[in-house]
Image (spheres, helix red, strand yellow):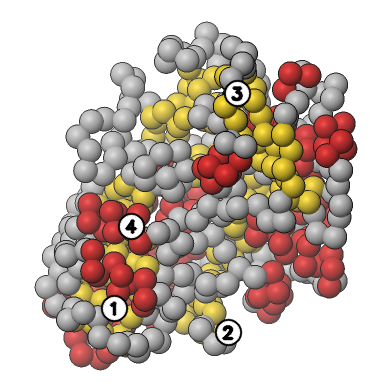
Amino acid sequence: MQRYALTVDKFLDHAAKWHGTSCVVSTGTGGEAQRITYRQLRGRCEWVSGAMLDQGLEQGDRVATLAWNTQDHLTLYYAAMGAGLVCHTLNPRLSVAHLAEMVNEAEDRWIAVGAGLQFLARQLLASCPTLQTVILLDGQAPEEDFQGVRHWSLEDLLRLFGRAARWGDFEEEAAAGLCYTSGTIGKPRGVLYTHRSNYLHTLRALQADAIALSAEDSVLVAVPMFHANGWGFPFAAPAAGTKMVLPGRSTDPVHLHELIVSERVTVAAAVQTVWLGLVEHLEKEGGELPSLRRIIIGGSHCPEALLRRIEERLDVRVQPSWGMTELSPLGTIEPPNVPPRAGSRTSGRSPMGLDFKLVDAEGAALPEQRMHVGRLMVRGASVAERYFNQAESALDAEGYFDTGDLALIDEAGYLTITGRSKDLIKSGGEWINPREIEDLVASLPEVGLAAVVGRPHPKWGERPVLIVEPRKAHAIEREALLAALRGRVPDWWLPEQIVLVEKMPLAATGKIDKQRLRAEYAGG
C-alpha cells in the first residue's frame, strides 16, 4: 500500500479542494464578522509558513500563540503545523509567572499575540530569553517597542516575506502541538501531540456516535482554541468541510445568541458555564435559537438538572462528554442520535480508538469491570505516553495512563465519572464523594452552581464545606440546601459549613476553581 503520512495539514488541503467555498467566520475586534473560505485560508496559511521558514524557523521549533478564537489564530495553527513547526497554545488567563514557566520549558522562539494581549506579551519577553520574534494578530499595530525584539503584524509578515511552502514534508510522528494541563490538580505539565495522534483523534471525533460533524453543519467553537486543541474542532471542522464560527474573545451570551442566529449554527461546543449564561439571558430577555440542534459540553461534570434546563430552554440535544488534555482530548461522549437514557445522564461511550480499564487503589484491575467504581485508566493512539521534557513514562506496566478520575462503566458501556480521587474527602476514616452532594444541591431550582471542598478538622480529619452560587434573582436558605441532602446521603456527609457566594470562582479553562475554593474556605 502507499505510504501516506497522517499529518494534520491534509485536513485543510481536503477542505480547500472539496469544500473550498465553505467558510470560517470570525468576530473581529470591532465586533464585525470576518469571512474567509477554506480555499482562501489554505493559501494564506501556506504563505505564512513560507515567511516563518524564511525568517529562520526550522522544523521542530516551537511557536507560541497567545490568542483568542479568531481567523488569525486558526491561520497560525495550520501555518506552523503545516511547515513542521510546533504550535504551542498559551492560555491568556493564566498568570505571567505560569506562562513564563511554560514558554521557558518549551523554549518557544516566536510568539503570536492576539488582540488586547500586547501588555501580557511584553511581560513575558522580560522573562523568556528564547523568544526572538513577536507576530501581532487580529489587525493589531504595535502599541510601543517590544524591548528590542523584532516584531511584525501578520499582514506585514505576509507582505514582506510571504511565499509558498511545501507542507507535510516530515514524518507523521513529528510533533505538531504543545498544550499544558490547566494545573487544577497540581503543577501544569506539557503534552506534546504528534501529527499522527491528532489525525487519529480527528477520525475518532468525527465518528457517527461522537461529534459527527458534516459539510451541512455550521459549528460554533466557543471552547478556547488554547484549551486542549480546541477540543479538536480546528481539525475536525475542515476535515468534514464544516462551516466554522469563531466568537473571538467574547463568550458573552448576547454575542453568542447573535452569532448562533446570524450564522445558522447547528452544533456548538463550550463548557457548561457558557451555556448557563446563555440560558439565563434567554430566560430574562426572550429569544430562540431555531437552527441549533446540538450542544457539546465538556470541561467538567454537568449536573443533570442543568442538562435538562439547557435542553428544555434551548430545544437542543446536549451531548455531555469527558476528556483530558492528555487524551487530545476526547475520551467519551453521549451519541447524538440516541435518545437520552432514562435516569442519570452519563459522559457517554468511547468512540473507536481508546481502551479503558478500572483499577483499585493499589492499581490492580477490578475483577468486574462493569457496574463497579474504580480508578479510570486509558490507552490509545492519542493518549500521552509521558509529559513533555520528562523521561519517566506516565503509563502502568500494561501501557495504560492514569486519568486520576473515579468512574463507573455500566452494562451498555456508558461511562459515569463519579469524582476525582484528589477531590475525595476522608472524614473519620471514611470517604465522602463531593460529586454526589454537588449533583443533589444543583438539582434545586434556586441553585446556579455548587461545589464541595474538604476542610481540615481536628477530630474527623476533614469535613465538607458546601459553596453555592444562587441562581440569578433567586434567594435560598441554608436549611433548604441541607433538606435536599437529608435522607439521600449519609448524615455524616452533611456539610458542616455552607457558603453562599455571588459568583463562583472559575479557573482559566472555565471549570469551577476548586484550588481557589480550598484556599479561601478550607481554612474557615
Q: Which residue corresponds to mark 2?
A: 31
Is residue 494 rendered to the left or right of residue 176? Answer: right
Tell me the amino acid under the disc marked 4. Answer: Ala
Q: Which mark is residue 457?
A: 3
Sort mark 3 into few (<14), some (14-19) or many (20+) by Cα contacts within 10 Å. some
x then y, percent, for residue 297: 62, 50
**Front of the two marks 3 and 4:** 3
Q: Amino acid at mark 3?
A: His
Q: Earlier in the sequence, mark 3 or mark 1?
A: 1
Q: Quadrant of residue 20?
A: bottom left
**Residue indicated by mark 4:** 97
- Report how far apart the C-alphas of labels 3 and 4 lie in the structure: 33 Å
Between the C-alphas of marks 1 and 4, the distance is 21 Å
State the residue position of label 1.
Answer: 135
Closer to viewer: mark 2 or mark 3: 3
Q: Are marks 2 and 1 in contact (CB under 8 Å)?
A: no
Q: Earlier in the sequence, mark 2 or mark 1?
A: 2
Q: Amino acid at mark 2?
A: Gly
